[in-house]
Image (cartoon, rainbow, N blue to C red):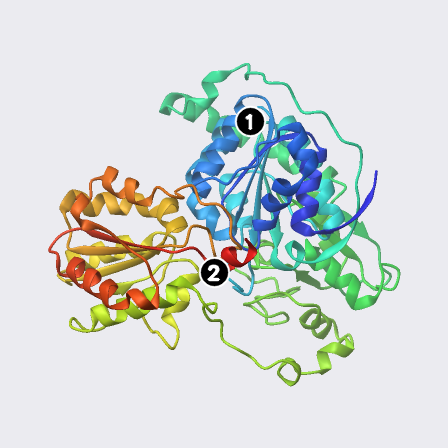
Amino acid sequence: MSIRLLLGDEALAQGALDAGMSGCYAYPGTPSTEIMEYLQASAEAAERGVHRQWSANEKSAMEEALGMSYAGRRAMVCMKHVGLNVAADGFVNAAMTGTHGGLLVAVADDPGMHSSQNEQDSRFYAEFAQVPCLEPSNQQEAYAMASAGFELSEALRTPVLLRLTTRLSHSRATVCTGAVQPERPVSLPEDRRRFVLLPGIARQNYEGLIARQADFVAASEASGFNRLLPGRDRSLGILACGIGFNYVMEAFGSEAACPYPVLKLSQYPLPVGLLRAFMASCERILVVEEGAPLVETRLRGPFGDDARIRGRLTGDLPRAGELTPDALAKALGRPLPVAAAVEAGALVRARPPRLCDGCPHIASYKALLEAMQPVGPGRVFGDIGCYTLGALPPFGAIDACVDMGASISMAKGAADAGLAPAVAVIGDSTFTHSGLTPLLDAIWEDSPITVFILDNDTTGMTGGQDTVGRGKIEQICVGLGVAREHVRIIVPLPKNHDENVRILRQEIEHPGVSVVIAQRECIQIKRRQ
C-alpha cells in the first residue's frame, strides 16, 4: 500500500494496473488521454509487459479490448465521450456477446465542451446498451472502481462502462492504493458460440441480456458505491450522482453538517428499491448530476409531471454546461465560496486559442489561402485537431468542422452536389483514425476533391502522442488507389511558400482525387527533443 497524488485519470489507470489488468487500448482525446499516458510511463506496467499502445481509433480499441477479454484476461478501453460514438458498434454488441475476462470501458465526458463538439452524457450509452455503469465521485473511488468494475464484469459476464468527467479526470487528490492482484491466465470462454453474432445466436444472447437486467439492478442495490446519508430535515432530499456528491459535501463542509438526507448514486442501473424508499421519505428531491438530466428525467416520470423533483430541467441548476460548486451552492441557498465573488475577468483576460509560434500549420494555411483565391470562399472542409484553429483569425481558412474524418466525407458530398473544387483539410492522426474510408469513397468515384493532409508527425492536439500512420501517409494514399502523380509532398516553411502555392493550385485544378501532404514536425515535439 502507498499514498499517491493522482489525477482522476491516473487513479483509474493505477487501479486497473493493481487489479491485474493485462492490456489497455485507447485513442487520445481530452479529458481521457492521461489514462493511457500514465500506463505508458509506468515502470510496473513495463515490467509486467502490460499492453499499452495507442490504437488507430476508438472502434479498433474497443474491439481489441474485447478480444483480450475473450482470451480470459482483464482489459480496459479508454476514450472521450464523442469517441464512444465511434466505438458504439463494438460497444453495444459487446453487451450481446458478454465478456470472459473483465472488460472496463472508461469514458471521460466533457461537460461545458472545453475541447469537444458536444457535451453528451455517456450514461445514456450504458442504458442503451443495457450494461452496468460506474461513476466515481472522487479520485479514491476512481481507483477502487477499477477493481470493482473488473469483478462486476466477470461476475455478471458483461462489459462495464466507467464514466469520468473533466473535473474529476483533471484534478488531483491523494489516493491510497491497495494490494496488487495477479494477472489472469489466458483461457477461452466455455461457450465460444456466444461471440458469433449470427441472428439465431444473437437472439438468444439478447434474451439472456434482458434476463440479466434484474441481476444488474440487484448489484446496484447492494453496491457500496450507492449509499444513504441520513439527515434530520426531510423537507428536502438530495440525490447526488458521481462528482455531484463531492460538490454537495463542499457546499456543507462535511457529511455531518448536511441537514438533509443524501443518497449518493455511483452505480447504475438505477437502484429502484433505494430510490423508492428515499423519495417516499422526503418532501422534495434535488437531483445533482453532472451532464444531462438522466436521473431527473427518470424520476419525474414519463410525462415530467412530478413537481417534487428539482434539478436541471426545472432551472434549479443550469441546463447546459458544467455542474459547479457555485451553481449548487446557489440552488441550496448556501453562501458562495469566497473565490466566486471575484469575477474571473478581473484576474485573467480572456484570450482566444491560437496556433503555436513556429507551428507548421501556419505556413500550410497561408499557402492554402493564396491557392484558393481564384475559386473563392466556402470550399474548405476542416476536421478535428489543433489545426481546427485555422478557422479563427487571422486565417479564416476552413468553413466546416463536424467530427473526426468528416472533412473528406463532406468535401466529397459537396463535390457530388456540384461544388468544385472542394478541399478537405485533415491531420495525419485524424486521417488514419477515420479519413481512410471516405477517401476510398472518393477514389471509387474519382471525385473532384483535394485532400490536404497536415502531417506534423504526431497527435498534436492532445499532447503529442504517437500516430499509427507515422512515416507511412504517402504509401497509404497510394495503396488506397490515389494516382501516384497526384500524391504530392510539400514542406510548410515560409521559404517554400511560392512553390507550395503552385503545387496546391495544380492539385486543386485536377478534375479528380488528389492528395497534398504537408510534412513538417510539430514545433512542440521538436522543442521537447
Count of numbered badges drawn on the protein: 2
| Amino acid type for the residue under numbered disc 1 | Ser
Pick whichever, 481 or 371, lies toward us. Answer: 371
Q: Secondary structure at mark 2?
A: helix
Question: Vertical placement of 30 versus 105: above or below?
Answer: below
Which corner quadrant holds the N terminus? top right
Q: Which residue is mark 2?
A: 523
Q: Earlier in the sequence, mark 2 or mark 1?
A: 1
Q: Residue furthest bottom?
A: 346
**Nearer to us: label 2 or label 1:** 2
Residue 289 in the image, given as x and y percentages of width and height:
64, 59
| Amino acid type for the residue under numbered disc 2 | Ile
Residue 11 in the image, given as x and y percentages of width and height:
70, 46
Residue in the picture at 51% in, 62% down: 115
Residue 286 in the image, given as x and y percentages of width and height:
69, 63
Q: Quadrant of residue 388?
A: bottom left
Pick whichever, 429 or 109, lies toward us. Answer: 429
Question: Vertical placement of 39 versus 515: above or below?
Answer: above
Q: Which residue is mark 1?
A: 69
